[in-house]
Image (tube, grey):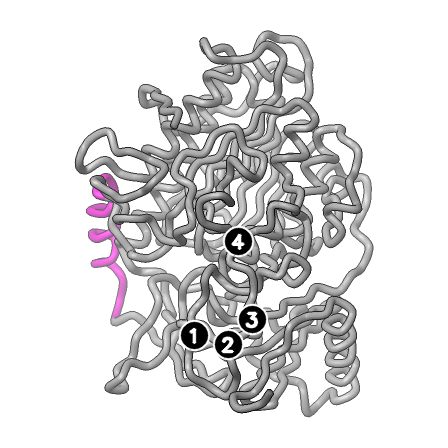
């Protein structure tokens, strides 16, 4: 295992450098580099630039100001592994047969467990493999969660793998000594998020002029955070400030009751948990460290930078055994519910893209999907499209460079599993501003107009039965066309 090292660099990067820098920072124009930040469980409104007044994200906010932020970007699933597979392949989770987090959980209910794959098939061609074929160096750090050994990042196109394995939460926790099979701690008490950003920044240094760098070779670096996934663990560098800020909030944390799908659950109604806020701040610090390194190496303006999350923030939890109310660590308001659910809070994400050819300071209302990142990267890097691979994604480049809008399309979420957030099997489809959600446990469906009701509070299924029927038919046609696995009732053959 390669271990990289890097002295700490300042946290806030400075935008502005000679345009057209080479991948090595030698002043000659070359193919753009790519840096992809993927955060785990970060909610759509967990950033300052997306409306949070409790969390602090100055580096990410500055990144948004330097590029385009999508106000209506979506993960392909309300849980992590399926979305990660969609990003890597440009293919819908149903198409790659990963529709639940790996390995999922078997819970009692009306339906049998729906079996899907426990790893991303090696036959799938990933974004990393495609860029590697085009001469890119490839680097991965952080959470993988797409298969056990033999299906790790180095088997899917990455030259280096720092910390990626089959686990969805950090093995051994966020502070060393952890038990990560692909990352050895340097000292007890080392904070995982800082270590991963150190390694990523060191790779950037080496790829742009360090001793191990290769002249003229562009790179693809993916920093895939374990933050802000449970166990919620305070970042000791910043938590005290958030604890003090929380004392200035009035009253107790609001609680929102939720009963979609037949299970009683509750959601946090305010962003006010200091430990979670500190974990968001740690992500921001790490982003700043890597972007500062790009700036210092002279390649910031020739690097495509993408910031995204794999599903909505953990907001909703089921009632406890004794009927006590439990809530998740963040709030996605004004969006409804969170991770594990097909309401907007579970699937809408913060998406920021910056780099050469991308308009700065733009907030787009165009609808983006996680499958779009693959073709968008190829487009921004001047590489040919691979529609036979990223069959379910479209390039966002026309939006980014201001040359046009995206063609209208349906977005579909198929989540036929039970989830620990109290979600029961179901599916959803968005067409224009209309969205239908089907709940199989209760044989029910809800209809919302997101343009007028982004919080999904006004169910129009009885008022607009013709629109409900239209969307449910479109959803069923899509499921048949994709050969989607449908839940089967317990006892049925």
Residue at 31% of width from left, 48% of height from top?
171
Q: Position of residue 6 (x, y in %)?
A: 35, 20
Which comes before the other along the chain, label 1 or label 2? 1
Image point 37% across, 34% down: which residue?
Answer: 196
* Image location (x, y in percent) of residue 401: 74, 36
Which badge, 3 or 2, is on the more N-terminal residue?
2
Relative depth, front residue between 483 and 360: 483
Q: Are marks 1 and 4 in contact (CB under 8 Å)?
A: no
| Gap in angstroms between the C-alphas marked 4 and 2 | 17 Å
Q: Can I make out residue 48 in this image?
A: no
User: Which tag is nearer the camera, tag 3 or tag 2?
Assistant: 2
- Give whichever of discs 1 and 4 has the lower sequence position: 1
Question: Residue 113 — which label?
Answer: 2
- Residue that label 1 marks: 106
User: Mark 1 and 2 residues: CB-CB less than 8 Å, in contact?
Assistant: yes
| Image quadrant in which the C terminus is located | bottom right
Q: Which residue in the protein does label 3 denote?
A: 342
- Viewer-side label of 4, 3: 4
As for residue 107 lying within the magenta part, the answer is no
Earlier-in-chain disc, 4 versus 2: 2
Determine whether the residue tagged by mark 4 lies in a helix, strand or loop: loop
Name the spot of residue 75 as percent of width and height, x first.
58, 57
Q: Is residue 88 left or right of residue 105?
A: right
Disc 4 target residue: 119
Rendered residue at 65%/17% (across/down): 19
- The reply to whether discs 4 and 2 touch (Cβ–Cβ < 8 Å) is no
Dot 4 or dot 3, earlier in sequence: 4
Numbered range of the magenta stretch? 236-251
Q: Are marks 3 and 2 in contact (CB under 8 Å)?
A: no
Label 4, label 3: how far apart the Cα atoms are: 23 Å
Q: Secondary structure at mark 2?
A: loop
């Amino acid at each position: 295992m390669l271990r990289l090292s890097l002295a700490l660099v300042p946290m806030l990067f400075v935008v502005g450098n000679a345009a057209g820098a080479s991948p090595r920072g030698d002043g000659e124009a070359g193919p753009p580099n790519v840096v992809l930040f993927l955060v785990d469980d970060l909610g759509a409104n967990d950033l300052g630039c997306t409306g949070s007044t409790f969390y602090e994200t100055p580096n990410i906010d500055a990144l948004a100001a330097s590029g385009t932020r999508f106000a209506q970007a979506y993960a392909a699933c309300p849980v992590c592994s399926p979305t990660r597979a969609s990003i890597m392949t440009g293919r819908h989770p149903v198409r790659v047969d990963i529709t639940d987090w790996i390995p999922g959980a078997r819970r009692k209910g009306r339906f049998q467990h729906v079996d899907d794959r426990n790893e991303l098939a090696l036959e799938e061609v990933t974004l990393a493999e495609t860029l590697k074929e085009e001469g890119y160096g490839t680097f991965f750090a952080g959470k993988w969660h797409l298969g056990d050994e033999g299906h790790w990042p180095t088997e899917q196109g990455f030259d280096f793998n720092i910390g990626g394995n089959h686990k969805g939460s950090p093995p051994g926790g966020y502070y060393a000594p952890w038990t990560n099979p692909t990352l050895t701690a340097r000292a007890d008490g080392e904070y995982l998020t800082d270590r991963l950003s150190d390694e990523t920044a060191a790779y950037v240094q080496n790829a742009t002029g360090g001793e191990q760098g290769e002249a003229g070779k562009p790179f693809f670096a993916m920093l895939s955070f374990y933050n802000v996934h449970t166990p919620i663990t305070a970042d000791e560098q910043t938590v005290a400030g958030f604890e003090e800020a929380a004392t200035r909030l009035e009253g107790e944390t609001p609680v929102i009751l939720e009963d979609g799908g037949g299970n009683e659950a509750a959601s946090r109604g305010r962003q006010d948990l200091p430990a979670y806020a500190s974990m968001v701040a740690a992500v921001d610090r790490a982003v700043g460290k890597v972007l500062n390194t790009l700036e210092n190496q002279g390649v910031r303006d020739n690097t495509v930078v993408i910031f995204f999350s794999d599903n909505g923030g953990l907001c909703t939890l089921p009632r406890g055994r004794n009927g006590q109310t439990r809530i998740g660590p963040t709030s996605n308001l004004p969006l409804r519910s969170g991770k594990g659910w097909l309401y907007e809070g579970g699937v809408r994400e913060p998406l920021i893209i910056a780099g050469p050819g991308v308009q700065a300071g733009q907030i787009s209302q165009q609808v983006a999907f996680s499958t779009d990142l693959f073709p968008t990267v190829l487009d921004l890097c001047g590489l040919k499209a691979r529609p036979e691979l990223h069959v379910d994604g479209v390039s966002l480049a026309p939006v980014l460079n201001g040359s046009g809008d995206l063609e209208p399309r349906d977005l579909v979420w198929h989540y036929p599993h039970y989830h620990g957030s109290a979600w029961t099997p179901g599916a959803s489809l968005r067409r224009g501003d209309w969205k239908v959600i089907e709940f199989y446990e209760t044989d029910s469906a809800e209809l919302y107009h997101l343009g007028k009701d982004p919080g999904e509070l006004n169910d129009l299924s009885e008022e607009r039965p013709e629109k409900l029927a239209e969307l449910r038919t479109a959803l069923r046609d899509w499921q048949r066309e994709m050969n989607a696995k449908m839940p089967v009732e317990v006892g049925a053959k």
